[in-house]
Image (cartoon, helix red, strand yellow):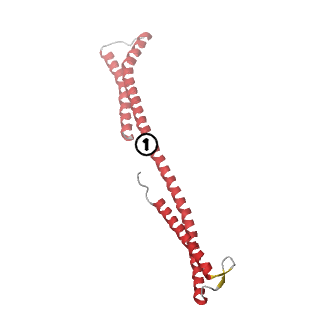
Amino acid sequence: MNFDDLDSKIDKTSKLVLAAIFIVPFSYLVWFVLDGQNVSKNTSDWGTFGDFIGGVLNPFIAFFAFYWLTKSIQIQKKELTETKDALKESSQAQKDQAELTFRTLKVQALNSQLEYVNTRILAEREYINQLLQQAKTHGLQYTVITKEAENKKLDEILPPLNEELAKLSKEQENLVIQIQNITSPVTGR
């Protein structure tokens, strides 16, 4: 039931009750005048008349009061159910948002690590390329100063560098897999 219909029904009921409040005493007054009755000066007669009017109107008014009381309880129950459902949806949306935020932060952290690993791989490859250029010119027995400021021959430096490069490539691959696992859609929901 929408609020416009509810307002319309309440308005109609109010008009009906007001009409009853005026029609019953008016009809009694018309009957009283047509029957030729005199207006009593005795207050107990007026008390009896008031009891009569109250007895006629009270059940009518009580019926409508009870009707609107039960109607308001039904409306409140419906609204409470809708509010409960909305709160459940809101709670789920907040959980989903928190999960998305967590995933986003995790992906950002992994991307930072991946950038660092990529930078190290590039640096190692450039260093190896420099050493290979020197090897072409001078041979593998040529002595160079390493990154660690040590004097070593090229054939001693290149194998550990290749191992380090392989290790970094494996770390890069693992980071990419982790990022793909986090960003892939979750199944089973």
Quarter of the N terminus within the rendering: top left
Q: Residue at x 44, y 60 (%)?
A: 184
User: Could you tell whether 113 is left or right of 145 in the image?
Assistant: left
State the residue in front, 80 or 135: 135
Which amino acid, by three-letter code, is at mark 1?
Asp
Please provide percent x and percent y for residue 181: 47, 60
Judge whether residue 119 can be spotted in this image: no
Q: Most extreme residue toward the left, as rendered?
A: 34
Would you name the residue on which mark 1 appears? 85
Judge whether residue 128 can be spotted in this image: yes
Mark 1: few/some/many CA within 10 Å (<14, 14-19, 20+)? few
User: Could you tell whether 56 is left or right of 115 in the image?
Assistant: left
Q: Residue at x 33, y 15 (%)?
A: 32
Q: Is residue 3 above or below residue 143?
A: above
Q: Is residue 141 above or below residue 10?
A: below
State the residue in front, 134 or 77: 134
Please provide percent x and percent y for residue 130: 59, 83
Q: Residue at x 58, y 69 (%)?
A: 116
Q: Most extreme residue toward the bottom, as rendered?
A: 137
Please provide percent x and percent y for residue 156: 62, 79
Number of marks in the rendered image:
1
Q: Secondary structure at mark 1?
A: helix
Q: Residue at x 66, y 83 (%)?
A: 144
User: Could you tell whether 40 is left or right of 144 in the image?
Assistant: left
State the residue in front, 181 or 138: 138
Res. 41 image quadrant: top left
Please provide percent x and percent y for residue 157: 62, 78
State the residue in front, 32 or 139: 139
